[in-house]
Image (spheres, rainbow, N blue to C red):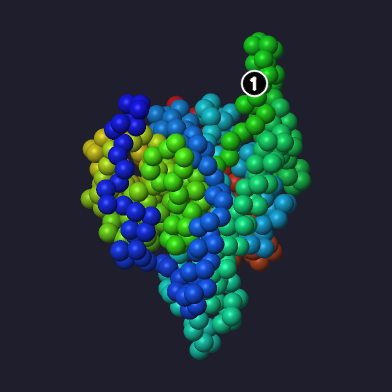
Amino acid sequence: MSEKLKTITPAKGWRPDSWQQKEASQQASYPDELAFRKALQRLSAMPPLVTSWEILSLKNQIAEAQAGKRFVLQGGDCAELFDECEPTIIANRLKVLLQMSLVLLHGMERPVVRIGRFAGQYAKPRSADMETRDGATLPSYRGDLVNAPEFTEAARTPDPDRMLRGHASSAMTMNFVRALVDGGFADLHHPEYWNLGWLEHSPLEKEFERIADSIGHSVRFMETVTGMKPGSLRRVDFFTSHEALHLHYEQALTRRVPRQWGWFNLSTHFPWIGMRTADLDGAHVEMFRGIRNPMGIKIGPGMSASWLKNLIRTLNPDNEAGRLVLIHRMGASQVADKLPPLIEAVSATGSPVLWICDPMHGNTEKTESGYKTRRFANIVSEVEQAFDIHATCGSRLGGVHLELTGENVTECIGGARDLDEQDLGRAYKTTVDPRLNYEQALELSMRIVGKHRSLS
Ligand code: PEP
Ligand code: CO
């Protein structure tokens, strides 16, 4: 047994169903108990979506990011939809993430860990269990894993077969992503494969071409000097992540595997706990405590230093490297006040964590015409402030967590094309939170590089 394994112990008193003894918030209530049990039984027998060695490889990469040797890019939809499990949408999302990672890799001079919010991001927390419209009250939409968004009784009634559809759609997404990546789609020799049509005529086109050319040049130079064609340049890793909210679904995919100790959540490489379900004594924290995956915790302005320290003690009692990622999402106007005391509290524990910034969820607002939107300027501001705050507190910002899409949507205001409130109606497609479109996402990665350079 290696030194590392000896010091990491299985969680005491934990079982895959021990969360059921705790208060579980944000769970759906299924009217047909028998159908629910049957679907869970079926799901428990189905193949997993990821493997333990991929999970442990990601954990190693996160440990390297904790040591400042990598930067994490986590991004994708707020909520995936079953109807959007189709090749163009999946490929475009992958292209944006690849292009952003190229910009980050080039500008920060370190490998980027790419984690998609995809292949399972189907369950959503809601502020209320029920929704009332014109005098009628129905269960809230909790994501495609649970029910459908239309405001009818049939659509909103939680349907257990959706868990099986969620598993199948995640598997199809994964399969397509793996096939693209293995087939050379992500080949660093050919960044032009990742171009999305509308980069042409974009104010960012020249800058991106310059970066892509420079990387192509470096790759060829290295091959000439070493006389080798490293396989790793033809193939990049992609990991999956989702909010592990629906605990029965997560339990059905939490398994033991041969030749490894302990339990893995094999529904995703990197599950995270949302801001609304991080109660120390709640069911979600209990579920996460016993799995060996690396995991995220969303940290909002309501988080206290003692709460966070207790979460770290509960979720990473052995101070294992690569296990914990703290995803802060304070909002541009609050990050300067709220973040420093938390960084200081965590540093005092000596426990290794990776801090990453989600500049989306603290910057959501409603326009007068009723659109939920986010201002690009606030998103950039929160990330830039986060870089400064970490540097001042002797810590390090190790990544970003973003809601984005490869489609040409108009959901966030601002950016190089200066979208304004009037533009929102043109291509507003999200059913949940507003996402950066392709161009805004690429521009954000350039701004991140600019900020990073100004500090180093
Ligand atoms: C989300 O990531 O879509 C989300 C709901 O975030 P948070 O838990 O941070 O509000
Ligand atoms: Co969201």
Residue positioned 67% across, 59% down in the render: 84
Please say if 119 is above or below 181: below
> In the displayed structure, does residue 386 sit left or right of residue 161?
left
Answer yes or no: is residue 337 visible.
Answer: no
Q: Position of residue 179 (x, y in %)?
A: 69, 41
Please say if 94 is above or below 301: above
Please tell me which residue lies in front, 27 or 371.
27
Please say if 111 is above or below 205: above
Quarter that holds the C terminus: top left
Residue positioned 67% across, 63% down in the render: 83
Residue positioned 62% across, 26% down in the render: 232
Q: Position of residue 257 (x, y in %)?
A: 46, 43
Please say if 72 is above or below 150: above
Q: Position of residue 376 (x, y in %)?
A: 54, 51
**Amino acid of disc 1:** Pro
Dividing the picture into quadrants, the one containing residue 126 is bottom left
Residue positioned 34% across, 63% down in the render: 20
Answer yes or no: is residue 256 visible.
Answer: yes
What is the secondary structure assignment of the residue under circle 1?
A: loop
Q: Position of residue 193 (x, y in %)?
A: 74, 37
The residue tagged 1 is: 230
